[in-house]
Amino acid sequence: MSTSILRIAIILAVLVSLTSPLTFVFDKRPDLCYNAATDASGQRTVLGVADARVCAVECASNTTLCSVYEYLHSNRSCILGDSCNLLLYWQLSTGPVCNTQVLRTRADCETTSMRPAAPTTTTPITTSTTTSTTATPMVVFNASGTTGKTGSVQSFKPPEVNTCYKIEAWGANGGQSTKGATGGKGAYKMAYFNLTETLKIVVGKSGTNSGSDHSNNGGGGGGGGTFVYITRSSNSHQLLMAAGGGGGGGDGSSSYSGKDGSDGTSSTCSGSTVGQGGPSKGTDRSGGSGAGWGSAGDSGPTGNNGGYGGQSATGSWTGGDADGKGDGGYGGGGGGGGTDGSGGGAGGGGGGYSGGCGGSGSSGVGGGGGGSFVDASGRNSEGSNGHNSGPPGKVVIAAVARANCN
């Protein structure tokens, strides 16, 4: 790669804070995709900038289209745009790392993790010039951790309103039982939306694996659902998309895997109500059911080794406690049932538009997968059962051609 291609020009508006400086790392790579090839030389670091919106990068070669993404450590999201006009697209003012890369094909990267490598040099850069062009941002929202009962709601403010955006969502996978039964995989949903308002995003975390000690563990936790919605008031929300989480593995047998999250609006278990939390099986050692969009999941008999149901929005999407160690994932996953002298605990149900049922403790089976949803305002929607390579959920939002929203 020539020196001219590796040369990076940076503009910085003078907003310097010596008391709480930020660090911007610009790293030229030979390919946009993070996993593609080894890093090229030419990394630069910019210190002492108080506001991420002053950050922009320009291509050094007229024949090469460069792209930049900003990795936001506070919520593990990536903001992607053309290299010459990112001032419009920085979403947060703290903690960014920006990486410059050569763009070959954008489509190749829509399913690739874009987490940048840690910086290796710290060469201060000051000022330069740039030109402007139209940017196409892509934002990747990840959970704050792989597993865990709690998390936080993230936000996305469209850089351009009345623009067509492609939204993709993956539910989280269920956890593994003590005997090694695997959790189900989260569902996948995609649709195109004409966005005009700020979105709220809940990214499901995977259910916790139960421990190896059979005396006090059991079923795996249900995976959390992933939700994209608009808040109208403190208690009024419009759901745009949901992707169901997978059920936790059951401890009755190593073959009692959790069910995958469902592409359809219903969960994978019978007797559930569409759009609501999953019902309890009611037997000892049953897993807690996953939350639905409208309500929390039911708990198993908690005095008899049952897991607790996952919580919906009113309960901050907290995953259900397990009787053993297989807690439900953030996003409303149900907790796994515990083991006693009579048998193994059942897996927790996955969260989703419709919550998956916790597995029945009478046989220690896996939990059900949560259901999924796309609002009527979404165009050309697609989806599939159990599509998450996971384990946690994810949301990807990208600006696309307006024709996709027709």
Image (spheres, grey):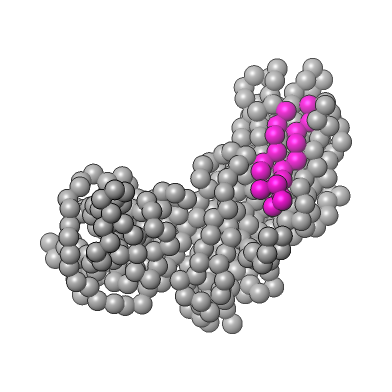
Question: Count of labels shown?
Answer: 0
Let me know if residue 243 appears in the view: yes
Q: Quadrant of residue 33?
A: bottom left
Look at 77% across and 52% down and name the residue there. 295
Does the segment drawn in magenta span residue 317? yes
User: Is 41 located above or below residue 229 in the figure?
Assistant: above
Let me know if residue 252 appears in the view: no
Residue 2, image x and y in percent?
A: 14, 62
Look at 33% across and 60% down and name the residue there. 51
Does the segment drawn in magenta span residue 397? no
Residue lying furthest front in this view? 19
Residue 242, image x and y in percent?
A: 65, 59
Is 101 placed left or right of 394 in the picture? left
Residue lying furthest left in this view? 3
User: Is 58 located above or below residue 183 in the figure?
Assistant: below
Residue 258, image x and y in percent?
A: 70, 40
Look at 58% across and 57% down and name the residue there. 201
User: Is 305 located above or below residue 46 in the figure?
Assistant: above
Specify the principal SS of the magenta part.
loop
Between 194 and 174, which is closer to the camera in this rendering? 194
Query: If the image is split into quadrants, where does the C terminus sit?
Result: bottom right
Between 278 and 20, which is closer to the camera in this rendering? 20
Is 63 placed left or right of 344 in the picture? left
Between 80 and 34, which is closer to the camera in this rendering? 80
Q: Quadrant of residue 31?
A: bottom left
Q: Which residues are magenta?
A: 305-323
Residue 53, image x and y in percent?
A: 35, 64
Query: If the image is split into quadrants, where does the N terminus sit?
Result: bottom left
Look at 87% across and 36% down and name the residue there. 282
